[in-house]
Amino acid sequence: MPRPYALKMPFVALFISALLCGPGFAETARENDAWITRDAMRTATGQEIPAGAFGILTIDRPREVTLLDLRGKVGRGTVVLRSDEPETCLTLPVRFVAGDFGGDTVSGHLADPIRLTLKSRRVAKVLARGRDVVSDMYRVSGRPHPDADIVLRSGLEESFGFVINPGRNILGDVFGVELQEITCKPH
C-alpha cells in the first residue's frame, strides 16, 4: 500500500512549478524588457533605436521586381541591436528578401528604403546568434502595437512576408556572422 505523502509529492511539485513559471513570470520578463529598453539609443553613425525596442533593421537601397501578380523586394543592409554593455550596441550585416501578391505589371526598380523596428528580445537574440528571422514565425504589425515582435516603419506593407538572413553572403551561413560593437548612448 502506497504511503499517503508519496501520492501528494507530484502534485506539490506541479503546483510549485506552476507558480514559478506561470503568467506572473512572463509579466516579470516584460517588466525587465521595459526597463532595459526604456531609453532611445543613438549610435555614433546617427542611427536610433527607439525606446521600447531591442533593435532596428535598415535596408537603404532595396530592389523591387514585379511579375504580373508577384511582387518582391531584395536588398542588403544592417541590423543594430542593444547590447548588455553600457553605451555599446551591436551591428551585423543582413540580407533581406520580401514578397507578396501585390504586383500588377512587369517591372524592376529601386524601391523606397525599408525600416523595421525589432520590438522583442526573442527576435534580437535570434539575429545575434546568426539565425534567420522569418516573418511567419513572429507577430508583425504595420503600426506600433504592444504585442508586436516586429514593427514595419517604412518600405513594406503588412501583406509582405519576409526573411532576414544575417551575413553578407553564404559564408555567413556556413561560418557564422561576426557582431561588431559600436558606441551608442541614451538619447
Image (tube, grey):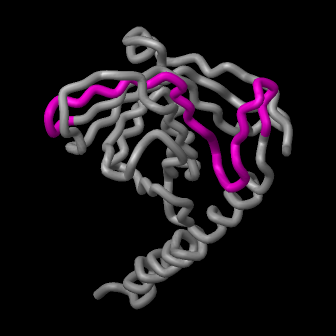
Residue at point 65% right, 36% down?
A: 81
**45 within the magenta span:** yes
Please determine whether, in this image, residue 83 is positioned above or below residue 172.
below
Please determine whether, in this image, residue 144 is positioned above or below residue 91.
below
Please determine whether, in this image, residue 96 is positioned above or below residue 150.
above
Range covered by the magenta-colored residues: 42-70
| Residue 79 found in image quarter | top right
**60 within the magenta span:** yes
Judged left or right of residue 165, residue 106 is left
Residue at point 77% right, 56% down?
A: 38
| Quadrant where the C terminus is found in the figure | top right
Could you say where residue 106 lies in the image, as x and y percent from the top left? 19, 27
Residue at point 22% right, 39% down?
A: 103
> Most extreme residue toward the bottom, as rendered?
4
| Quadrant where the N terminus is found in the figure | bottom left
Could you say where residue 150 lies in the image, as x and y percent from the top left? 49, 50
Q: Nearer the viewer, residue 16 or 147?
A: 147
Q: Nearer the viewer, residue 170 or 7?
A: 170
Could you say where residue 30 lies in the image, as x and y percent from the top left? 63, 64
> Most extreme residue toward the left, as rendered?
68
Q: Nearer the viewer, residue 13 or 90?
A: 90
Residue at point 64% right, 26% down?
A: 91
Could you say where residue 77 lies in the image, as x and y percent from the top left? 52, 23
Count of numbered circles in the view:
0
Please determine whether, in this image, residue 137 is positioned above or below residue 16.
above
Judged left or right of residue 25, residue 131 is left
Judged left or right of residue 127, residue 74 is left
